[in-house]
Image (tube, rainbow, N blue to C red):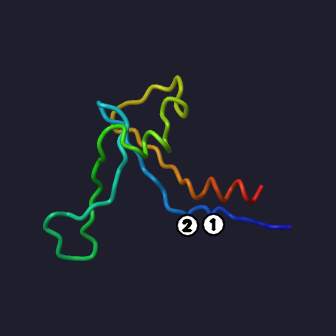
Amino acid sequence: MIIVNNELFDAFPIMKFIYTEKGWCELLVDLKEDFDTDADFKFSKSEVDNINVKNYLQPEKTFEGIKFKEGDQYEFSPDCKLNENKIK
């Protein structure tokens, strides 16, 4: 018997997406322009419909028939899904 708790899945990296007036963008971690400590990071938005939006998020299939408002966010972990399938 194998027991897996939720902490295992929390350890996998995520991809984070945000809905804007122009469509879905990926939220990326970036450095602040005037950083002076190790904690000077910020989120920045990718171009609308970048390669990760098209290949991983696939909003046409994932959110078919769902209405979103500007600022709605979605997190996805490709590594989590791969490992979930291995456990089954």
43 or 83: nearer the eye? 83
| Residue with the mark numbered 1 | 8
Pointer 1 and pointer 2: residues touching (CB < 8 Å)?
yes
Identify the disc placed on residue 78. none
Amino acid found under the numbered disc labelled 1? Leu
Taking the spot 50% from the left edge, 44% from the top edge, the residue there is: 56
- Vertical order, 55 against 36 (above or below): above
Would you call the spot at circle 2 few (<14 residues within 10 Å), some (14-19), or many (20 or more)? Answer: few
Tell whether 29 sits left or right of 58: left
Quadrant of image for the N terminus: bottom right
Helix, strand or loop at mark 1? helix
Q: Place residue 6 in its image quadrant.
A: bottom right
- In percent of width and height, residue 45 lies at 29, 47
Would you call the spot at circle 1 few (<14 residues within 10 Å), some (14-19), or many (20 or more)? Answer: few
Tell whether 22 sits left or right of 79: left
Quadrant of image for the C terminus: bottom right
- In percent of width and height, residue 47 lies at 29, 42
Helix, strand or loop at mark 2? loop
Amino acid found under the numbered disc labelled 2? Ala
Taking the spot 51% from the left edge, 49% from the top edge, the residue there is: 76
Identify the disc placed on residue 11. 2
50 or 37: nearer the eye? 50
Question: Separation of disc 1 and disc 2 at Cα?
Answer: 6 Å
- In percent of width and height, residue 63 lies at 52, 31
